[in-house]
Structures are given as C-alpha cells and as structure tokens.
Image (cartoon, grey):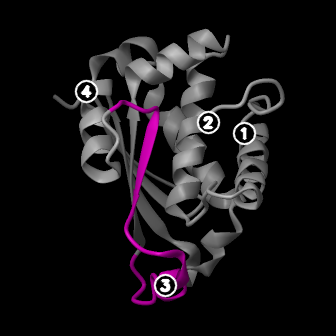
Amino acid sequence: MNWNVGMADAASLDLEVIAETPAWAERLPDFVELCRAAAATAFAAAPGHRLFHGGAAEAGLLLSDDARVRALNKTFRGRDEPTNVLSFSNVEIDVLAAAGADGRPFGLGDIVVAFETTAGEAAQEGKFLSDHLSHLVVHGMLHLLGYDHSTDGEALEMEALEVRALAALGIADPYSSVGET
C-alpha cells in the first residue's frame, strides 16, 4: 500500500516519493518534503547535474522495509542482507552529457531506503531519524549522478559533496564523529 506519493520540481529535479511501509509516515509525517529537499539539495550540490541539457532530471524514491531491501540487495548485489540504501542508476556517468537533449527530464534511476535499518542506525548513532534519512537520500542521489566510494579518492569526493548538501539542509557533518553509509 502506498501511504504517500508526491512529485516535486526543485533544483530541476522531479522526485517521485512512495512510502510502502507505514512506519515512515508514522515516524516522519513530513517525509515527502524532507526527501524532496534532500534530493534537490544533493542534485544542486553535485557538479554532474550541469551535464544535462537544461539541467532537468527525474528520479524515484521508495521508502520500504528491510525485507524488500534485503531481497533487492540479494538479487542485484549478491548480498543476502538488508542495507540502509540502494541506488539503481539508469545510465553510466559518461553518457549523461546527452541526457535531456530532447527537452524532457532525464530519468536518473531509483533509490530505495529500508526503514528498520535506517531507524536502527539513527538510534544507535544518536541521530534524528529525519537527519539520517536526509543523509541517505543525499547519498543515494549522488550515486544516481555517478558518484561512488569504491576508492579512497572517490569516497573523499562523495563525502565532501554529502557534507556540503547536508550543511545546506542544516544537518551536521555525519562523518565528523561516526562514519556511516
């Protein structure tokens, strides 16, 4: 069951937000606005968004649970365990320059966030659930834009963008005391 579906155009990003797990709406009644703000801020903070003709893009965000994320993680990453966030990019970064040439927003891909893992991490790390969700949405959006953290250099670049986007949202640096995602 979809508890809330929303579309927003912010920073040239249309984000569809769907919560299929009721706990998201119960714990964060303003989750749609929170997620839209986080995604738009990440999109604007990442230099990659300027690659698009007109800078317009769209993405999907599914707020789900550990069971669904575990199944997706097993199917697509070969890891039979839940994780906090998964990103499914539609294209490789080297073809993004042609994206949107037809004047329509380019579909970046989808992000999926697991409630139980995210809420558990937030509680364990003494963070607000809203701040941790914002971080995971920023993190996922950066993955859709071609950023990664496979090497130390990539991780430093991606973390710097995350910190900048989160600061714009009024959220403290998540890497200053405890590493995550």
Is 58 located above or below residue 174 in the figure? below
What SS does tag 3 mark?
helix
- Number of numbered tags placed on the structure image: 4
How far apart are labels 3 and 2 at the CA level?
A: 26 Å
Is 157 located above or below residue 115 in the figure? below
- Residue 64, given in percent of the width and then of the height, sits at 31, 30
Give the extent of the magenta segment.
81-104
What amino acid is found at the position of numbered circle 3 in the picture? Val
- Residue 31, given in percent of the width and then of the height, sits at 46, 28
Q: What residue do we see at 39% from left, 89% from top? A: 102
**Residue 88 colored in magenta in the image:** yes
Eye-nearest disc, 1 or 3: 3
Q: Residue 106 appears in which quarter of the rendering?
A: bottom left
The residue carrying mark 2 is 135
Q: Quadrant of the C terminus?
A: top right
The residue carrying mark 1 is 166
| First reached walking from the N terminus: tag 4 or tag 2 | 4
Res. 67 mark: 4
